Image (cartoon, rainbow, N blue to C red):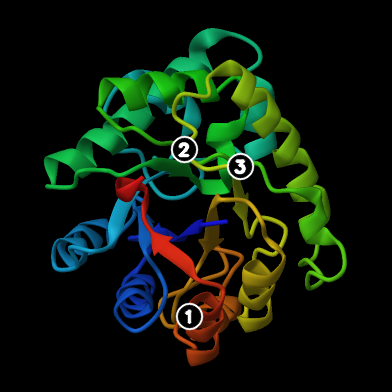
Amino acid sequence: MDRQIIINADDFGLCQSVNKAVAQAHTDGVLTSATVMANMPAAREAIDIAKKLPNLGVGVHLNIFEGHALSTDKLVHCLLDSKGQFALSPSKLALLSLGTSTIKNAVRIEFAAQIQWAIDNGLRPTHIDSHKHIHSFPVIFPMVCELAGQFGISAIRFTYEPGKVCQTPWPLPGKGGRKRAWLIRHMARINRLQNSSFLKTKAVLGIAHTGKVDVDFFKAVTLYNSTEIVEVMTHPGYIDGLYADRTRLIEQRKLELDALCSDKTRQYFKAAEIELIHYGQL
């Protein structure tokens, strides 16, 4: 069986140290893809780096939980605090979006602004995913599909992670990983029924193991994953410039960077005859 794997770095543009790590993980390691947070401080630098790495597929990491809004539309104010920063937690936003259309309209406007910003700055997005997987929430997913069609983006991350990754012989997942993966897996099943035309992979790996993606995890990916086309979600970075009020992943990012650049990791993929690709190559 021929297997293809996309190895994506989320949070491209979060800060300079993450940008540096993404570039290194691609040039010196097995990283093939990244998604840029258009509204974060180092987003423009991330775009500049991407332009120098023609073999790195780059998409958009939709974000309505960190930083400021890109849209100036007044409707988006319902998502912000008095300082203009995103203020809602994922659970609160999910609940509010079930009510009136106000929240959903605000989210759609801001998502469109982030995609438009990336395109205006010279990016041709290979795909869409999101911070804290909010795009997979069933009320939000249809509007993300509409935006993908509107902007000519052919792929959206399919957040279905098989339950077996939380069991032996896979490494133990991170704290709360099993519960998080269970919830997102069920939303992904609904997403597939809502609109499967943008779902180009069969699964994603790394949700349950967020913060614990290491060499042993990559070894398990090559040995125990039999799905033909999957994405592996990673968060490489250096500690400098990372703060707890912006991300819960700090020290773990350097461990993930080391795993992505490890000779052992490279050999595992080579021995398994797995083709490393990005979304633009599907």
Q: Earlier in the sequence, mark 2 or mark 3?
A: 3
Q: Earlier in the sequence, mark 3 or mark 1?
A: 3
Of the pair 171 and 281, the residue shown nearer to us: 281
Taking the view exactly as shown, the residue that stands out farthest to the top is: 100
Give percent across and percent down for residue 127.
36, 42
- Mark 1 and mark 2 residues within 8 Å of each other at the beta carbon: no
Horizontal side of 151 relative to 274 (left or right) equals: left
**Label 3 crowd (10 A; few <14 / some 14-19 / many >=20):** many
Which residue is depicted at the point 61% across and 65% down?
A: 248
Of the pair 116 and 261, the residue shown nearer to us: 261
What SS does tag 1 mark?
helix
Cα separation, mark 3 vs mark 1, equals 22 Å
Q: Which mark is residue 159?
A: 3
**Relative to 247, residue 112 above or below:** above
- The amino acid type of the residue labelled 2 equals Lys
Q: Earlier in the sequence, mark 1 or mark 2?
A: 2
- Residue of label 2: 200
Give percent across and percent down for residue 29.
39, 80
Horizontal side of 20 relative to 261 (left or right) equals: left
- Residue of label 1: 257
What SS does tag 3 mark?
loop
Which residue is depicted at the point 41% across and 76% down?
A: 241
